[in-house]
Image (spheres, grey):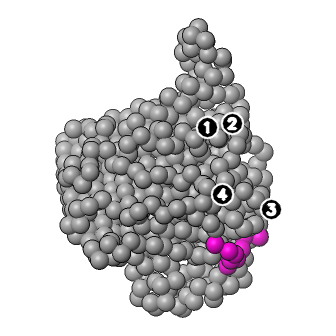
Amino acid sequence: MASAAPRYDAWLSAEAVAALSEKAGDPSSTARERREAHSRFLKLPLEPNPLYRGYGYFSNVDLAGLDPAASGPAVALPPQNEGTVRVVHDASGTRGFVPPELVSAGVRFRAFEEIWSGGEADIVAFLGKEEEATDRLSALGSALVNRGYELELPDRYRAPVRVADYAVLSLPHEAISIHRSVRCGVGSQLLFTEEVFSTPEVPEGQRLHASSTSLTTGADAKVVYLGVHSPDMRTVSIYRRRATTGANSRIAWLWNGMGGFRTKVRNQSTLAGAGSEVTDLQTFFGAGDQSFDSSVDLTHTSTDTHGQSITRGVFRDQARGMSRGLVRIEHEARKTVAYVSEHAMLLSKGSRSDTIPILEILCRDVKATHSTSVAPVDPEKVFYLESRGFSQPAAVRLIAEGFLAYVHERAPVAGLRELLYPLLAARWDGREVPWTGPEFPALPPLEVTGTEGAPEWRFDAKLR
């Protein structure tokens, strides 16, 4: 992985930002914020913390010629699942469908174009008051916001709401930057999937996919947010996800990285409601010269909160991985239980992974633990399987799949391991997973284990 010195001004020019602003119809304040974000993009480092700059593995990225204002035809879609909210981000923009029964129940959805047509006040409320970007790529995503929507679930709507969100890249030098604002009312239940793919055509140059999600839950709300990342090997991705919990609410972040060239994931969850829980589960499979860079931040600010972060990565060839999990327990966060687990398996001498768990504990009445390891596949396990008739490659594959399944089996989605296996198998065999329209095997109807509309959702790895 030889490093290249990119010219960031060639990635995105001030003229391209101005063209996007004009196409979107930005009010003056939003246009100014885009320009300021572009200026920060040119000046900021890729990694703001000097302790981690040696672990970023973001070499050979060249997004020269990004065209955030480009447009094209809409992609073909798989059949609509009954009762599902479907949102698609592609070259034609953002479009969504909400079943009439959910509209009647008070589920509110507004797409990017509708929000922008509402004027400055609506745009400011949609984008929210996010902290100013401290790294180059977050600033880039802020400057390029050109897709998105606002989704709000009403209070005390007890039936689980299923949302299927697809991002499909199909143009050369494409730049899709999505912002979502999701609010779950008191007692509501949400099962959300975010799936990222590319069409089969191989374009010239690299492409950018930026995804920003702001999630707020009311008291007793329950959310499962499942991400499946499988774009082509020319896609550079930036994920930013932020959540704030209400009292006794539960959030499960699930993320599975299999595709893409360079991928950064930044998850920040604030457990602000007493008795709330956050589970953050991530898996990565890296091959070729892929790299994944993940950071999970769990901040406990209220009493009796429970948080856990479990990450597993498998890397072969020249692939790179980096994961860091930070748990911060504030002074008033008594009776907190927190756990960080980060483990990686290396299948070749050229692969590498770094795992960095961090605990910042400012309160005595808590329980916080962590575990971490980076190691090759266990030769004794390989020998055992070979003695049972497996070939050496098949034995290594079986062990690696089981290593990732440790996370899948703890996810509150029924049969998640089986649902994701076709994608993992394709990547293991060196194949990409292209979006092919109606025949594409998008995720089928899902079930959150133990719910069926009941008040308790089962989280297998409870810490209580």
| Residue type, mark 3 in image | Glu
Separation (CA) of disc 2 from disc 4: 19 Å
Residue count near mark 3 (Cα–Cα under 10 Å), binned few <14, some 14–19, many ≥20 = few
Frontmost of labels 2 and 3 is 2
| Residue type, mark 1 in image | Ala
Q: Which mark is residue 425?
A: 1
Q: Which mark is residue 436?
A: 4
- For label 2, the residue is 429
Q: Is residue 3 visible?
A: yes
Residue count near mark 1 (Cα–Cα under 10 Å), binned few <14, some 14–19, many ≥20 = few
Mark 3 or mark 2, which is nearer the start of the sequence? 3
Mark 4 or mark 2, which is nearer the start of the sequence? 2
Q: From this viewpoint, which residue is outermost toward the right?
A: 204
Mark 3 or mark 1, which is nearer the start of the sequence? 3
Q: Is residue 67 magenta?
A: yes
In the shown orientation, is residue 377 left or right of residue 312?
Answer: right
Query: Which image quadrant for residue 146?
Result: bottom right
Separation (CA) of disc 1 from disc 3: 27 Å
Main SS category, magenta section: loop
Q: Nearer the viewer, residue 7 or 51?
A: 7
Q: Nearer the viewer, residue 112 or 49?
A: 112
- For label 3, the residue is 204
Residue, x 62% and y 66% (percent of image)? 76
Frontmost of labels 1 and 3 is 1
Q: x, y percentage for residue 27?
A: 53, 91
Q: Secondary structure at mark 1?
A: helix
Q: x, y percentage for residue 65?
A: 77, 70
Segment tinted magenta in the rendering: 65-74
CB atoms of marks 2 and 4 within 8 Å? no
Residue, x 68% and y 28% (percent of image)? 348
